[in-house]
C-alpha cells in the first residue's frame, strides 16, 4: 500500500442541478487532483456532504471513487457515525468497495465521554480489518477526543492515525509525540490556516479543504516541508492566507463548492439544509480567485 502523507484532499461531492451526484464531474475532479500532485483522496467526508447523502449514495460515491482512482493514490472513505454499529457497517462496506483507509469522525450529538470514545473506536477497530484514521473536530461534533485517549487508541493495530482539526499547536505537539513513540501512527492536520505549522511540528500531512481549489499549492507546501525547505513553504503558504479565511466564512462546504463552480469544475449545487454561498462574500471571493489566477 502507498505511503499516506502530504496533501490529502477532503474532496467535495459534485451534484447536478437536480441534486443528484454528478459522476462525470467527480471523474474530472479526480483526474485533475492526481495530475496536480494530490497525494490521496478523502471520499464523503464533511466536505463531501456526508451528512446529507443517503446511505446508498454514500457507498456508491466511495465505490465509484475507489474504482476510478484505481490505486493511483490512496482512497480514504469517510465512515464515521454517531452510532457505533452504523460506523462499523459503513467501514465494512467501504472496505468491500475498495477503499484503502477509513476516516472516523467522533460521534456527534450524543456527546460521549472519553471512556465512551475509546470504547466506540476500539469496537470499530475490533470489528473491521482496515486501516482507520480517527477524526477530531469538536466545533462540529460537540465532543473532543483528547490526546490521552488517542494514545490508548494508537496501540490498536487497525488504528493508524488521526486527523486533528483543532487549531492548537500544543495539541499537535501532544499528538506528534505519540507518533514519535509509535512510528506507525500518523498525524494529519485538519485545519488549513495552521496546517503548515503542524507539518513543521512533525505532522505527516493535511486533510485539506483548500486542496479542492489549489491542489498543486497545498501539495508543494507539503513537499517543501518534507525537504526542509521551510522558507519556500512559508512564502507559498502566505500567498494562500486570504483564501484559507474565505473558505470558512460560511459553513464548509458552502464556500468551496461555490469557488469550484466559478472555476468551471462543478455545477452550482449543494444539499439542504446548506444553501448557496451568501452574496455578501461574492465580490471578495471572486477577487481572490482572480488574484490567485484560478479564473
Image: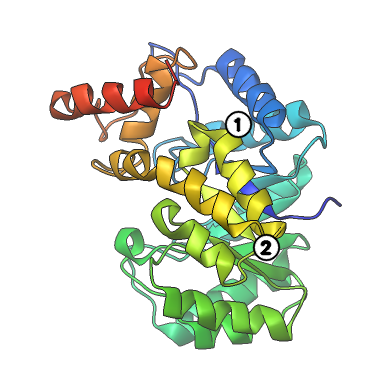
Residue 210 vs residue 20, the one in the foreground: 210
Which residue is disc 1 drawn over? 61
Residue drawn at (34%, 39%) of the image: 247
Which one is earlier in the sequence, the residue at label 1 or at label 2? 1
- Is residue 92 left or right of 202 when viewed as pictured? right
Question: How was the colour assigned to the protein in this rendering?
Answer: rainbow
| 141 to 258, vertically: above or below | below
Q: Label 1: few (<14), some or many (≥20) within 10 Å?
A: many
Residue drawn at (44%, 41%) of the image: 47
Q: Label 2: few (<14), some or many (≥20) within 10 Å?
A: many
Tell me residue 111's x, y (percent): 34, 73
Q: Which numbered dot is residue 111?
A: none
Tell me residue 45's x, y (percent): 51, 45
Q: In the picture, which quadrant includes the C terminus?
A: top left
Element type at marker 1?
helix
Q: Which numbered dot is residue 132?
A: 2
| 200 to 102, vertically: above or below | below
Residue drawn at (52%, 66%) of the image: 198
Residue drawn at (54%, 31%) of the image: 57
Residue lying farthest to the front in this orientation: 231
Amino acid at each position: 500500500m502507498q505511503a499516506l502523507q502530504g496533501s490529502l484532499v477532503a474532496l467535495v461531492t459534485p451534484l447536478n442541478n437536480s441534486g443528484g451526484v454528478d459522476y462525470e464531474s467527480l471523474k474530472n475532479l479526480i483526474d485533475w487532483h492526481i495530475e496536480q500532485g494530490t497525494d490521496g483522496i478523502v471520499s464523503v467526508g464533511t466536505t463531501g456532504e456526508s451528512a446529507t447523502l443517503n446511505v446508498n449514495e454514500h457507498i456508491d460515491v466511495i465505490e465509484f471513487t475507489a474504482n476510478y482512482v484505481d490505486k493511483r493514490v490512496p482512497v480514504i472513505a469517510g465512515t464515521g457515525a454517531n452510532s457505533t454499529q452504523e460506523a462499523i457497517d459503513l467501514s465494512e462496506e467501504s472496505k468491500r468497495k475498495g477503499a484503502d483507509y477509513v476516516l472516523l469522525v467522533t460521534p456527534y450529538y450524543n456527546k460521549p465521554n472519553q471512556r465512551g470514545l475509546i470504547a466506540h473506536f476500539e469496537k470499530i477497530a475490533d470489528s473491521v480489518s482496515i486501516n482507520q484514521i480517527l477524526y477530531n473536530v469538536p466545533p462540529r461534533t460537540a465532543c473532543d477526543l483528547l490526546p490521552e485517549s488517542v494514545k490508548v487508541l494508537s496501540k490498536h493495530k487497525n488504528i493508524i492515525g488521526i486527523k486533528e482539526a483543532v487549531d492548537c499547536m500544543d495539541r499537535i505537539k501532544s499528538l506528534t509525540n505519540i507518533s514519535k513513540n509509535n512510528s506507525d501512527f500518523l498525524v494529519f492536520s485538519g485545519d488549513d490556516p495552521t496546517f503548515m505549522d503542524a507539518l513543521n511540528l512533525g505532522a505527516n500531512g493535511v486533510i485539506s479543504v483548500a486542496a479542492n481549489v489549489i491542489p498543486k499549492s497545498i501539495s508543494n507546501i507539503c513537499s517543501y516541508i518534507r525537504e526542509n525547505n521551510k522558507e519556500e513553504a512559508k512564502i507559498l503558504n502566505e500567498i494562500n492566507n486570504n483564501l484559507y479565511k474565505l473558505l470558512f466564512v460560511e459553513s464548509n462546504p458552502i464556500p468551496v463548492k461555490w469557488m469550484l463552480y466559478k472555476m468551471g469544475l462543478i455545477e452550482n449545487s449543494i444539499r439542504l439544509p446548506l444553501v448557496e454561498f451568501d452574496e455578501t462574500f461574492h465580490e471578495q471571493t471572486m477577487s481572490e480567485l482572480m488574484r490567485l489566477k484560478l479564473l
